Image (spheres, rainbow, N blue to C red):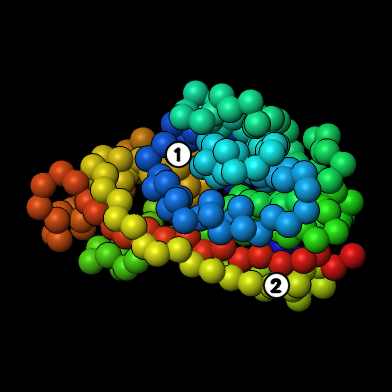
């Protein structure tokens, strides 16, 4: 399968930066309904889950109480170390593994494999070959995508992001559609959670933007990062009074079977 050219390893490597792991904490959490959907997809026993590219455990820490065991894999040690210190990170049901999912040791069978958009950084040919071997007969691969409803500042901030992005080759793409075209995945269902309000300070909003691979502070010149922050603040404060912003976030869960 041919991945979009902007998904280069050099951009994925930026998630190993401790500052990016810290910035991740400003990202909105997944709505609680997300984990009810994921739990409902599990049919086979034991209820063992593989979380691919787990980051700071936004899925793993909240899904673990609903399953028998969960292996959370990420190649960024700072992400894993941060995850362990967060609520639910010390659950005995979670096995944290630092390494590339293409290479780490995996269990014999999982009743669910789940991942967020971090799945787009993996070597699809390799991981799908591995997934076929470790996913149970009735198990699903699920992709979890966190998004927000349109905000008054969305368009203006989007243009600022395009101007300052350190990955100017980025183009929107549909990962699941590419998998289906590549003949490795058959979509079985899709469900969106109800939107839930999320409030954070303008400062935290900026930090969550800097948790993106194309906007990490270490990849931007200091002055340019400062200019980016100033322009985003100006765009937001044209629509918001005070120091906090509010948006409505929701999750889309897409699941399907692997072509054996």
In the rendered image, residue 48, in percent from the top left (x then y), is placed at 73, 43
Image: 180 above or below 38: below
Instruction: Assign a secondary structure to mark 1.
Output: helix
Q: Residue 217 versus residue 238: which sits nearer the camera? A: 238
The residue depicted at 69 percent of the width and 30 percent of the height is 95
The residue depicted at 27 percent of the width and 65 percent of the height is 151
Q: Residues within 10 Å of mark 1 (few under 14, many from 20)?
A: many
Q: Is residue 221 visible?
A: no
Determine which quarter of the picture holds residue 43: bottom right
The residue depicted at 53 percent of the width and 54 percent of the height is 36
Q: Residue 180 versus residue 196: which sits nearer the camera? A: 196
In the rendered image, residue 137, in percent from the top left (x then y), is placed at 85, 59
* Image quadrant where one finds the N terminus: bottom right
Task: Find residue 24 and name its label.
Answer: 1
Determine which quarter of the picture holds residue 66: top right
Q: Can residue 83 be seen in this view?
A: yes
């Amino acid at each position: 399968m041919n991945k979009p050219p902007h998904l280069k390893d050099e951009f994925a490597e930026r998630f190993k930066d401790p500052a990016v792991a810290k910035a991740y904490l400003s990202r909105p959490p997944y709505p609680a309904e997300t984990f009810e959907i994921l739990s409902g997809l599990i049919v086979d026993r034991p209820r063992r889950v593989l979380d691919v590219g787990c980051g700071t455990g936004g899925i793993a820490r909240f899904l673990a109480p609903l399953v028998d065991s969960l292996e959370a894999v990420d190649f960024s040690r700072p992400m894993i170390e941060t995850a362990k210190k967060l609520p639910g990170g010390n659950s005995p049901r979670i096995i944290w593994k630092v390494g590339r999912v293409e290479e780490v040791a995996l269990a014999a069978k999982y009743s669910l494999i789940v991942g967020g958009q971090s799945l787009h950084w993996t070597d699809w040919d390799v991981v799908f070959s591995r997934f076929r071997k470790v996913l149970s007969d009735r198990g699903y691969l699920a992709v979890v995508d966190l998004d927000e409803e349109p905000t008054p500042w969305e368009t203006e901030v989007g243009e600022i992001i395009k101007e300052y992005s350190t990955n100017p080759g980025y183009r929107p793409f549909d990962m699941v559609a590419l998998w289906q075209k590549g003949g490795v995945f058959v979509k079985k269902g899709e469900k969106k959670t109800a939107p839930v309000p999320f409030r954070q300070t303008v400062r935290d909003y900026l930090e969550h933007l800097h948790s993106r691979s194309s906007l990490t502070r270490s990849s931007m010149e200091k002055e340019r990062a400062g200019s980016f922050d100033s322009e985003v603040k100006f765009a937001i404060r044209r629509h918001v009074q005070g120091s906090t912003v509010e948006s409505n976030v929701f999750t889309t869960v897409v699941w399907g079977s692997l072509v054996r």
